[in-house]
Image (tube, rainbow, N blue to C red):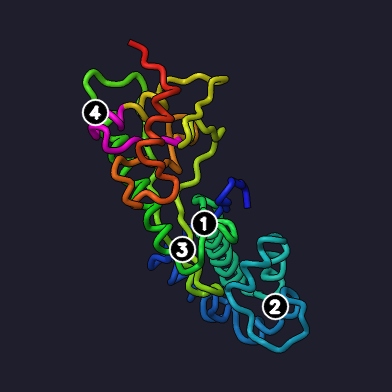
Amino acid sequence: VVANGAMRECLRMKKICFDCEHLEWLVVRKKPLEEVVPGIGRSTSRWLVKEIIHDGKEHTITVGNLVDRMYTDEKLVYSLLSKVVHDRSKRESAISTCRLLYMRDKILKGKWSHSNFMAKRYKEGVIEPEEAEKVFRHDVIMQEFCKLLAYAYNRQIPCPPKQIDMLHVGLVQLVSRKGKPFLAYESFVEGEYHKWNTNSGWQDVDRIRHTPQAFSFFTFRYTQGKTIVVDVQGVKDLYTDPQVHSSDQNGEYGEGDLGIRGMALFLSTFRYDC
């Protein structure tokens, strides 16, 4: 958990796309070393088991075993290969192949290691488990609706001094976890996170910025008073986690939709600069 709010908490996560390259490499990692590295026979492989794995068991060393050992001591592996492969040309070929396997694993492992997404979940007791999917779907729809309004804001004539954007958000279900919980996820954005206004009329008067408030007011005018986007927050002008107030208050935007009262709360503190 990297951030806590009143109702939700945020977690770093990584999204892994298992394309053909990744799947092929996972197969290669499980192969016996003698099938992949030239100059390595079964007797050589058995000797390397004792030198590299050190578990005292009788089994075949795999490409994955060798590569994992290279992360801790790459030079040792090359030294062992030099001892066990006596033919010079085969030895050079074996070392070269192992080096390529190691580099390939590092490249693919690097793609997997970055926590490039942020997961969001409701705290225990905030929503009923049977309502989770419905609530999360409403959250996703609401944020995507706000993204469309951000796009409309940027296309105004004359163009606003600063462009804005709203993060895309998705929904994922952890089917292997107990209860099969739902999570919302979006891209992780580095930088100082800041809340500029809330759904109850508050706005940050200590760090005055016009763009977040202008965006909220724009949404009210653009939709002809039917909706307004508040709870504007994020990193600089890349926003996330908005709340929508709607004039009909039909429940589409969750419990945070305070309807006309919420609109009035925002407008009571908003200062229109002619």
Q: Which residue, given by chain and number where applicable, does mark 2 sit on?
A: 48
Q: Quadrant of residue 124?
A: bottom right
Relative image position of residue 228 (x, y in whole percent): 34, 35
Name above or below for residue 87 compared with residue 111: below
Pointer 4 local density, CA inside 10 Å: few below 14, some 14–19, many at least 20? few
User: In what element is the residue under mark 2?
Assistant: helix
Relative image position of residue 145 (x, y in whole percent): 31, 44
Pointer 2 local density, CA inside 10 Å: few below 14, some 14–19, many at least 20? many
Question: Marks 4 and 2: CB-CB under 8 Å?
Answer: no
Question: Marks 4 and 3: CB-CB under 8 Å?
Answer: no
Mark 1 and mark 2: Cα distance apart in space:
34 Å
Mark 1 and mark 4: Cα distance apart in space:
33 Å
Residue occupying image coordinates x 23% and y 18%: 158
Question: Marks 1 and 4: CB-CB under 8 Å?
Answer: no
Residue range in magenta is: 218-231
User: In what element is the residue under mark 1?
Assistant: loop
Relative image position of residue 26 (x, y in whole percent): 50, 72
Front: mark 4 or 2: 4
Front: mark 1 or 3: 3
Q: Which residue, given by chain and number where applicable, does mark 3 sit on?
A: 132
Point out the tag, 1 or 3, that comes first from the N-terminus: 1
Question: Marks 1 and 2: CB-CB under 8 Å?
Answer: no
Q: Which residue, given by chain and number where applicable, does mark 4 sit on?
A: 155
Mark 4 and mark 3: Cα distance apart in space:
35 Å
User: In what element is the residue under mark 3?
Assistant: helix
Point out the tag, 4 or 3, that comes first from the N-terminus: 3
Q: Amino acid at mark 4?
A: Arg
Q: Amino acid at mark 2?
A: Leu
Mark 1 and mark 3: Cα distance apart in space:
22 Å
Residue 14: mark in rendering:
1
